[in-house]
Each structure stands twice: as C-alpha cells, then as structure tokens.
Image (spheres, grey):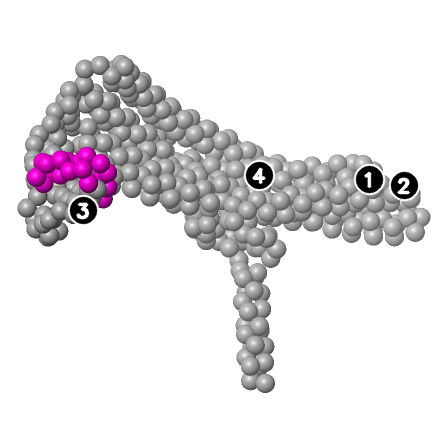
Amino acid sequence: MKKILILIFTCLLSSQGFIFSQQKIWSLEECVKYAIENNIQIKQQSLQNEIQKNSLDLSKFQLLPNLNGQASHSYSFGRALDQNTYQFYNQTLQSDYFYVGGSMPVFNGLQYYNSIQKNKYQVLASQQDLQNISDNVGLNVALSYLQILLNKELVAANENQLNITLQQIEKTRKLVDAGSSPRGNLLQIEAQAAQEELSLITQKNLLETSVLTLTQLLELKTPAGFEVVVPEINVDPNAIVSGNIDDIYAIAEKNRPEIKSSELRLAASQYSLKIAKGGRSPVISLNYSLNTRYTYINNQTNAPFRDQFKNNKNSGIGLSMNVPILNGWQVNKNISNSKLNVETSQYTLEGSKKQLYKNIQQAYTDAVAALKKFNVSIKAIASTEESFRYTEQKFNVGMVTPVDYNAAKTQLLKSQSDMAQAKYEFIFKTKVLDFYKGIPLKLDQ
C-alpha cells in the first residue's frame, strides 16, 4: 500500500511538472538562450572545434621524438648462421630479436612549426564560426518571436472588426424587422461577417505557423501550450535611426565573427604556403636504436638467455639528411595551389566585408523606411478611424449603403495592419543594427 501511495504521489508531481512546462511563458532572451543551447548546427560546430583542437595537438606532437619497439622469434632449418658466433650450423636454429629505436626531427624547413601556427589559426577561426552560427540562430529566433507578436496584434484587430460587424448585424436585423431598412442590407452585412470570419481564421493560422516556426528553432517537440511574453512595445513617432551606415560598419568590421573567421583563415592559408615552400628544404633527422638477440641451436651448448641478452646488446645514434631533388613536381604544384588558396582566402575576406556592409546598408534602409511607414500609418489610422465613425453613424440612420460601410471598415483594418507591420519591421531592423554594434538582442519590457 505504501508503494502504491508513493507511485501516485510521484505521478502527481510529474503531471504538475508537465502542466508547468506547458504553461511556461517564454521571453525573447529565454528563447535565444534555449535555441543556442539546443541547436543541432551549433552542436555540430562545437564538435568541429574539438576536431580542430585535436589537429593542433597532433601538429605539436610532431616535434616530439618517436620511439618504436620490435620483437621477433624465428626458426631456421638446414644450414644457418649463428649471429652470436658467426658460425654455420646444419641444425634447427631458433632466434629471438629485440629492437627499440626511433628518430627525432632536427630540421625540415620549419614545416612542423608552420603546421602548428596554421592549426592555431584554424582553431580560432572555427571558434568564430561557432559564434557566427549562434548569432544567426539568435537573429532568426528574434525575427520569429516578433512575427508572433505581429500576428497576435493582427488577430486581435481582425477579431475586433468581426465583433463590430456582428454588433452591426444585430442592429440591422432590428431595423429590418421594424421595416426601417431593406433586407438586402442585412444580407450584405452577413456576407461581410462571413468574409471577416474567414480572414480571422486565416490570420489565426498564420499565428499558429509562426509559433510552430519558433518552436522548431528551439528544437521543441511540439508547439502545444507554447506562449511568449507579450511586452508593451511602443515606437516613438519622433524616433530616429541612430548612427549611420559607415559608423555601424566600422564597429561591426572589428567585432563580427564572420569577418574574424575570414581573417584567421587567410592567416592559416599563408602558413599553408610556408609549409608548401618548406617542402624544398632538406630534412635532417636524429636516429637512435638499441637492439639485442638470443640464439638457441639444437644439440649445442647454448649460453643462457640472460647472458646472451646482455652481451649481444648493440646501440647506435646518427644523423640523416633527405634532400628533395625531383618528386614529380609535387612540391612546386603544392606551392602553386597554396598560393591560389591564399588568393581565395583574400577574396573570401573581401566578400565577407562587402556582404556585411550590404546587410547593414539594407537593415538601415529598411529601418528608415519602416519608421516613415509607421508615422504615415499613425496619420492614416487617425483619419480612417474618424471616417469610419462618421460612416457608421450615417449607416445606422440609413444614409449610406452597406457597401460604403464595409469599405470604410476594411480601410480601417488595413491601416491598423500596415501600422503593426511597420512597427515590428522597424523594431526588428533597429535590433539588427544594434546587434551589429555589439548590443545583445533584447526587447524593452
């Protein structure tokens, strides 16, 4: 019985935790943080960083001496030479051979040193790639988050318009029943309500789609129960887009990870060229070895294993030099390809800078345009609201047709939608510009 009670209590706690998780309301900062922690592409790049670090370690280990051991046991039949006495025997001979030896690089045209430097820059570039991916994920999350907020406003605007129409249907029905208005007016307004209901459903579907998009960016299994914080966002009509394109670019060029990554890869390609040129240099190595052996001959007096192992020891040390003369033009072609890779890296850096400038230029232009559109929309809403109230009053006394009434209401909805879209476009683009300035993504709440 006690176990059953514990099981029930555990289930209750689990269900409460599930309900709590479903009722969690996500802020933009929480969404960005969660997406970065769970994004598959970021995890893959993190693994790539570890691979680059391993490559750096391997290039460092190339400077260390190498040491290898060997042991063998062999049988010789018939006439065989005893390596201990250098006499021939026509008997079965068994031999054990033990060897330890290796080499250490002394000079190879600084190829090992340049390999270390190249891998250092590749590690740093990989880290910048990781930061760039994280930044892009953050921007995509912010865009999806603002899209949800926009769709929520548009749903609310459509619901408000539908409620006005439904109220007008009731008023018109009373007028029709009283004989003060033709039945055609009621039918036209009911048709308008049906159209507005369809528009509302469409807008709700767009809201659900935007929620799904954000939850997929967060790698959540389902959008069910997902809600975001809806801050009160106001745009000052007197606001301006601060700074200018060149000033923002000057800041971004020094700090953006995509620029740093291209610069670091250019440096890595230059070290690759040095490595290729090092292939023309002689390679000098220090060699060393220690070996011994044991021999056993059937029907002969054999010295004990310990004595032979000790007495047959032999060691050596020496220098060797390998001079490249002709290797199928591989060295020259490697140098040529490395030079081309340096040029490619230079073009990549130039392209990254130009693309960054274009992105800032586009975001700045869009922000200015959105602000202008927002200010115009404020004036449009003020006039369309007044026009709609006037038209509604005239419609209530039968002075205008349902067609004119619906046209005024539709124009009001369009003005409200235009202002909402302009507002969120301005907010997103200004956040992008702030992001290029190094300011973290955040909504004022």
Q: What residue would you read off at disc 3? A: 298
Which mark's residue is nearer the viewer, 4 or 1?
4
Asked whether the residues under the numbered discs 2 and 4 touch, taking CB atoms below 8 Å apart as contact, a structural biologist would say no
Q: What residue would you read off at disc 4? A: 421
Q: Give SS at disc 3.
A: loop
Using the numbered discs, state the Cα–Cα distance from disc 3 to disc 2 in whole angstroms.
Answer: 124 Å
Q: What residue would you read off at disc 1? A: 402
* Amino acid type, residue under disc 2 in the picture: Gly
Of labels 3 and 4, earlier in sequence is 3
Residue 291: horizontal and vertical position, in percent? Answer: 12, 41
Of labels 1 and 3, earlier in sequence is 3
Residue most toward the bottom? 1
**Res 144 seen here:** yes
Report the magenta residues as a range. Answer: 71-91
Of labels 1 and 2, earlier in sequence is 2
Of residues 406 and 444, the one drawn nearer to the viewer in this rendering: 444
Mark 3, other Cα within 10 Å: few <14 / some 14–19 / many ≥20: few
Q: Is residue 65 magenta?
A: no
